[in-house]
Image (cartoon, rainbow, N blue to C red):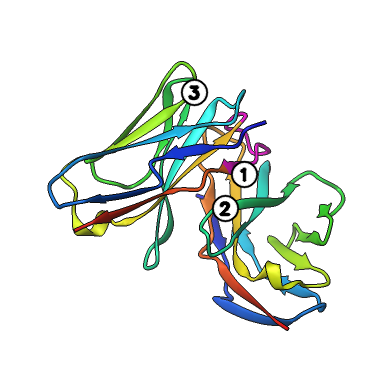
Amino acid sequence: KAGVTQTPRYLIKTRGQQVTLSCSPISGHRSVSWYQQTPGQGLQFLFEYFSETQRNKGNFPGRFSGRQFSNSRSEMNVSTLELGDSALYLCASSLGSLSYNEQFFGPGTRLTVL
Amino acid sequence: AQKITQTQPGMFVQEKEAVTLDCTYDTSDPSYGLFWYKQPSSGEMIFLIYQGSYDQQNATEGRYSLNFQKARKSANLVISASQLGDSAMYFCAMRELGGYQKVTFGTGTKLQVIP
C-alpha cells in the first residue's frame, strides 16, 4: 500500500507570493492533517479535514487555508508569503479522527521564503 | 485542553543500552490515545507505538515499549538495545476522544546513540 505523498518536496518562493501544497493520503484514509514544523516553534497544528469538512483549525492567520477533495486528497494554500513561513510542512493521514487512529506522515514539503 | 510535556530536550545513550524518553500529559477526557513518533534527520515522521487510555497492558512493538502510568499521567517510551539508527527526534502525542480533537504533540527529545 502506498504511503502518504506530498508534492512538491522542495519549494522556493519570494515574499508576497502564494503557494499551494498537495497531499495524497493512504488509500482508504479519510482524515488529513497539516502541520508546520520550524526549529523555533516545533510542530504546530494547522488544520484537519475529514470527508471534505474542516474538523479542526490551529492558531494560524487566515493566509493559511486548506481544502479536501472527494478522493481525500488535500491541498493547503498560503497567500502573501512572509519570511517566517519558511518551514517544513507535514501532511498526515489517518483512517479517522478518533483517539485511536494513528497518523501516518508524508515526507513533507520544505518551503523556503526569500 | 490537552497538553503534552517532554522535559528532555536531548539525550545520549550507549549503543546496545536501553533508554527511556519521558512524556507527561494533561487531559480531562477519560478517553484518549497516546502516540510516539520518530523523526530522523531526513524529516519524515514515523509512527512507533500507540497506547489507549483504557488499555490494561503496556503497549509493545519490537524494541519499543510504552511505560504507561495512568495515575501519574505519564507515557514514557522505552527503547531497548539501542542502535545507531535510533538517533533521531522523538515526539510524544495525544488525541482526546471527545469531540473532534486535534492531535497535540510535545516539543520532542533528540536522542543520540553513541557507538
Dot 2 surroundings within 10 Å: few (below 14), some, or many (20 or more)?
many
* Magenta span contains residue A50: no
Q: Amino acid at mark 3?
A: Ser
Q: Dot 2 corresponds to which residue?
A: B45
First of labels 2, 1 by sequence position: 1
- Residue drawn at the location 84% of the way across and 56% of the way down: B62
Q: Position of residue B43 (x, y in %)?
A: 51, 57
Residue B28 in sight from this viewpoint: no
Q: Indicate whether A103 appears above or below B6.
A: above
Mark 2 lies on a secondary structure that is: loop
Dot 1 surroundings within 10 Å: few (below 14), some, or many (20 or more)?
few
- Does the magenta stretch mainly form a helix, a strand or a loop? loop
Q: Amino acid at mark 1?
A: Asp
Which residues fall within the magenta stretch? A95-104
Q: Indicate whether A17 appears above or below B64.
A: above
Q: Are marks 2 and 1 on the same chain?
A: yes
Estimate the spatial distance between the alpha carbons at disc 3 and disc 2, rounded to whole Å: 20 Å
Q: Position of residue B64 (x, y in %)?
A: 79, 60
Q: Position of residue B8 (x, y in %)?
A: 59, 76
Q: Indicate whether A114 appears above or below A29.
A: below
In the rendered structure, find residue B29 and report the number of the disc placed on it: 1
Estimate the spatial distance between the alpha carbons at disc 2 and disc 1, rounded to whole Å: 26 Å
Numbered disc 3: what chain? A
Q: Are marks 2 and 1 in contact (CB under 8 Å)?
A: no
Which one is nearer the viewer's eye here, B5 or A23? A23
Q: In the visual, does B81 lie left or right of B70?
A: right
Q: Amino acid at mark 2?
A: Met
Q: Dot 3 corresponds to which residue?
A: A72
- Residue drawn at the location 83% of the way across and 54% of the way down: B60
Q: Indicate whether A35 appears above or below B5.
A: above
